[in-house]
Amino acid sequence: MPVVRGKTIEPLFTAEVIAERNLSLAQEIMRGPTDDLLVISVLKGSFIFAADLIRALHHAGLAPEVEFITLSSYGTGTVSRGVKIIKDIDSDVKDRDVLLIDDILESGRTLRFAKELMYERGARNVTIAVLLDKTEKRQVDLVADYVGFECPDHFVVGYGMDVAYAFRELPFVGVVTGDA
Ligand code: IMP
Ligand code: MG
């Protein structure tokens, strides 16, 4: 098992499996709404997935514009939790098809906020692509249009995802299982 920073990491989704899935996700996305497509990567965790997925979109024949938004959740509990914009996109989304890309869909708060925000700004269609879906952790009503993999209820790292800014560089998605 890989050892990084003195921790053993059990791979859940290998680089090869992810690469293959990205190609098929791009095919699915191509069959959805892609008119004047604006892809928005939801930072930070999605940066590697987005980098690979947009190249898979090119491979599938799409030529989107690409933007970034940094969102952060705040508060605890179920009532007082919210999402705020740390850094907004610069582009106008009015009458455009928008594809939001994120790493993990968990409670659903982050992506519901982003989706509603883009509709409020006049986007025509807002679809969501996530690498991982933790369906059983959902707390708001939200379904992703494109899902890489159903994710077991573990805290995962790698492929852009972190614990305290670490492990993002791993080419695979894994679970920290203990000290090596
Ligand atoms: P939610 O859907 O609003 O609860 O937030 C999902 C966000 O939480 C993701 O975009 C990640 O940034 C973060 N997150 C959730 N689960 C994990 C995990 O297992 N590893 C790393 N980040 C996670
Ligand atoms: Mg995130």
Image: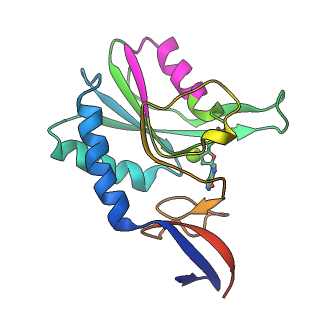
- Residue at the image point whose x is 66% and y is 58% from the top: 154
- Residue at the image point whose x is 56% and y is 32% from the top: 111
* Between 11 and 93, the one nearer to me in the picture: 11
Q: Quadrant of residue 64?
A: top left
* Vertical arrangement, residue 3 with respect to residue 153, above or below: below
Q: Is residue 148 found left or right of 20 in the rendered image?
A: right
- Span colored in magenta: 112-128
Point out residue 168 in the picture as x, y percentages from the top left corner.
Answer: 52, 65
Q: How is the image coloured?
A: rainbow
Please count the marks in the image.
0
* Vertical arrangement, residue 12 with respect to residue 118, above or below: below
- Residue at the image point whose x is 17% and y is 41% from the top: 60
Q: Is residue 123 found left or right of 30 in the rendered image?
A: right
* Vertical arrangement, residue 68 with respect to residue 161, above or below: above
- Residue at the image point whose x is 46% and y is 62% from the top: 159
Point out residue 113 in the picture as x, y percentages from the top left corner.
Answer: 60, 26
Point out residue 49 in the picture as x, y percentages from the top left corner.
Answer: 40, 52
Q: Is residue 91 found left or right of 157 in the rendered image?
A: left
Q: Quadrant of residue 141?
A: top right
Q: Quadrant of residue 28?
A: top left
Q: Is residue 122 one of those drawn in magenta?
A: yes
Q: Is residue 18 one of those drawn in magenta?
A: no
* Between 70 and 123, the one nearer to me in the picture: 123
Point out residue 180 in the picture as x, y percentages from the top left corner.
Answer: 66, 88
* Vertical arrangement, residue 122 with respect to residue 131, above or below: above
